[in-house]
Amino acid sequence: MAVGAHLEFETVGSRVHVQPGFLYWSSDRLSDLNPNLDVFYHFAPPGQVSPYVGAGVGLHRYAFDGGPDPGTDAGANFFGGLLVPAGTTHVFLEGRYAATDRAQASILAGVTARIGR
């Protein structure tokens, strides 16, 4: 199980989005706090269901419960998914791969709320 949050910046009419955020997960006494900066491109115009692809960079701060500190690792993010508009929000389903010394693959789902529109 993972928990995350992000901000999404776009220019009106553009299909390119800048998305700073973080992701936290914990499994088998190992956890990772991962701040990241991603950029993604969606293929359909805003307001339509659209596939998207993206990439970015992240910093992985690992912690091991009851053991030595496993350290920090930089990595690259690669992802793709589907955006589904829902009023002032959009729902997303995403496959993500983090290329690090402890490579990670995940499937994420969530809601992005739009503020100020």
Image: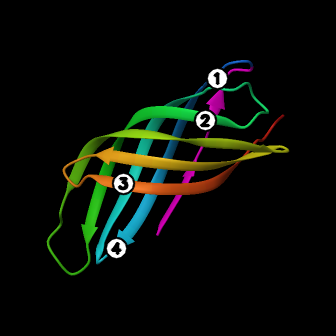
Residue 83's spot in the image, x, y percent? 66, 41
User: Do the residues under discs 1 and 4 have CB atoms within 8 angstroms?
Assistant: no
Instruction: Tell me which corner region of the image, top left, top right, bottom left or bottom right, holds residue 50.
Output: top right
User: Would you call the spot at circle 2 few (<14 residues within 10 Å), some (14-19), or many (20 or more)?
Assistant: some
Q: Is residue 91 above or below residue 27?
A: above
Q: Nearer the viewer, residue 84 or 39?
A: 84
Residue 87's spot in the image, x, y percent? 85, 44
Label 1 or label 2, whichever comes before in sequence order: 1
Mark 3 and mark 4: Cα distance apart in space? 13 Å
Q: Amino acid at mark 2?
A: Pro
User: Would you call the spot at circle 3 few (<14 residues within 10 Å), some (14-19), or many (20 or more)?
Assistant: few
Camera-side mark, 1 or 2: 2
Instruction: Tell me the residue at 41%/65% (across/down).
Output: 25
Indicate which disc residue 105 carries: 3
Mark 1 and mark 2: Cα distance apart in space? 11 Å
User: Do the residues under discs 3 and 1 have CB atoms within 8 angstroms?
Assistant: no
Label 1 or label 4, whichever comes before in sequence order: 1
Instruction: Tell me the residue at 34%/73% (across/down).
Output: 27
Indicate which disc residue 27 carries: 4
Q: Amino acid at mark 3?
A: Ala
Label 3 or label 4, whichever comes before in sequence order: 4
Indicate which disc residue 51 carries: 2
Mark 2 and mark 4: Cα distance apart in space? 30 Å
Residue where numbered disc 1 is placed? 15
Query: What secondary structure is found at the residue carrying circle 1?
Result: loop
Camera-side mark, 2 or 4: 2
Extent of the magenta region: 1-12
Camera-side mark, 3 or 4: 3
Query: What secondary structure is found at the residue carrying circle 3?
Result: strand
Q: Amino acid at mark 1?
A: Arg
